[in-house]
Image (cartoon, helix red, strand yellow):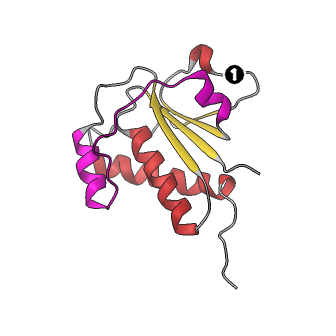
Amino acid sequence: MSEPTVLFVCLHGAAKSVIAAAEFERLARARGVAARAVSAGTEPDPQIAPVVVARLLEEGIDLRGLRPRRVTRQDVAQASRVVSFGCDLGDLALAGVEVERWDDVPAVSDDFDRARAAIRARVARLSVFVLPPPRTSR
């Protein structure tokens, strides 16, 4: 069985989707399970929001050098789960692929801490359904 992959998509691929992908991968590592998160935007910015880079770096997550990228049909097709932050995937959404909408997450530019807390809570709930059980040592 291949590792689960969650695609997080926001308009600019520079804040919410990046935070969600980092949080999902952090949870997977903490559980000792293989999983992958992809962040992308429908209209990507040239760089990840500086506040996101700085605040995640404080937590040991280094995003320096990464750039937002445009979501592709292949991203959607390869994802086990697709999450959208207030953007429409339009013709990229494939038949049979459910897009989970997290439209009510506050803007990172308005209140980073509130947005981060909302994203963390949702990713934690999502991980229960997507991530395999933690590995146990014998």
Question: What is the quadrant of residue 120 in the picture?
Answer: bottom left
Residue 71 image offset from top left, x and y in percent: 50, 25
Looking at the image, is 18 positioned above or below residue 132?
above
- Front one among 16 and 3: 3
Mark 1 residue type: Leu
- Magenta-colored span: 50-78
Say which residue appears at 32% left-offset and 25% top-offset. Answer: 45
Q: Quadrant of the C terminus?
A: bottom right
Query: Does dot 1 land on a helix, a strand or a loop?
Result: loop
Question: What is the quadrant of residue 92 in the picture?
Answer: top right
Left/right placement of residue 28 relative to residue 23 reads: right
- Front one among 6 and 114: 6
Say which residue appears at 30% left-offset and 36% top-offset. Answer: 48
Residue 36 image offset from top left, x and y in percent: 57, 48
Residue 15 image offset from top left, x and y in percent: 35, 38
Viewer can see residue 135:
yes
Question: What is the quadrant of residue 14 in the picture?
Answer: top left
Q: How many marks?
A: 1
Q: Label 1: which residue?
A: 94
Left/right placement of residue 93 relative to residue 56 reads: right
Q: Is residue 7 magenta?
A: no
Task: In the displayed orientation, state which residue is furthest to the top.
Answer: 91
Looking at the image, is 136 positioned above or below residue 63?
below
Say which residue appears at 65% left-offset and 69% top-offset. Answer: 134
Viewer can see residue 121:
no
Say which residue appears at 62% left-offset and 26% top-offset. Answer: 74
Residue 136 image offset from top left, x and y in percent: 67, 78
Q: Is residue 62 magenta?
A: yes
